[in-house]
Image (spheres, rainbow, N blue to C red):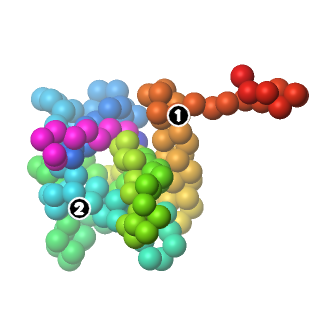
Amino acid sequence: MVTLKLVTTENESCYAHTYVRSLELSNRDFPERHKYAVGSGENAGFDQALAEREDGLPSHFYSPNLGKSQKANGYTNQRAHFIRFYNSTLIIPIRALTKSEEKAERKRKFDLIGFLCVDTLSTNRLNNGFHLFILSALADQMYNFMSLMRGKYTVTCGDNNGETN
């Protein structure tokens, strides 16, 4: 299952909402769709996907076996009985670095739009190798497209005389 989750801020709290899934009528969406807290510790997948990594890999959360991760690493998820819906997952943030006003600022800031989530009922089906790099590239392009559609930035084109249109 592939899911696009958009992020909103409500009362200074951040939430991820399902925007669209690869399966139109998913059991996950009944009786209604829910919002999931981001950055609160209630959803380890989102929180860990946002963390900057020291190993040089793109930011992400990966678990080949969530049942095992839940027991061994204290994996948290607000979805009750999530293991009925997925056992392995790869979560990539849809975001980009923002320009910092202060050059001395040490912590990088990001413009977060959402998450690209891929999961399966199978264990050990996804990997944090080529799956991660393909999905990270897709998430980057999703950010660009969504930013253009939201009017966050524009693209200028030059003609042969160097003038912009």
Helix, strand or loop: magenta stretch: strand
Q: Can residue 27 be seen here?
A: no
Disc 2 marks a residue whose amino acid type is Ala
Q: Secondary structure at mark 1?
A: loop
Identity of the residue furthest to the top in this view: 165
Quarter of the image that includes the C terminus: top right
Corner quadrant of residue 106: bottom left
Q: Residues within 10 Å of mark 2 (few under 14, many from 20)?
A: many
Label 1 belongs to which residue?
Answer: 153
Say whether residue 5 is magenta.
Answer: yes
Q: Position of residue 118 (x, y in %)?
A: 40, 49
Identity of the residue furthest to the right in this view: 160
Which residue is at 37% across, 42% downward? Answer: 113
Quarter of the image that includes the N terminus: top left
Q: Position of residue 13 (x, y in %)?
A: 16, 47
Q: How many marks?
A: 2
User: With 121 as the anchor, is 110 left or right in this view?
Assistant: right
User: With 92 as the anchor, is 73 left or right in this view?
Assistant: left
Q: Position of residue 15 (x, y in %)?
A: 21, 44
Disc 1 marks a residue whose amino acid type is Tyr
Corner quadrant of residue 16: top left
Say whether residue 56 is magenta.
Answer: no
Give the magenta part as a residue range: 3-13
**Cα–Cα gap, marks 1 and 2:** 31 Å
Q: Can residue 78 be seen here?
A: yes
Asked if residue 144 is positioned above or below residue 73 in the image, the reply reads above
Frontmost of labels 1 and 2 is: 1
Which residue is at 47% across, 64% downward? Answer: 103
Label 2 belongs to which residue?
Answer: 44
Which residue is at 37% across, 47% downward? Answer: 112
Which residue is at 21% across, 57% downward? Answer: 39
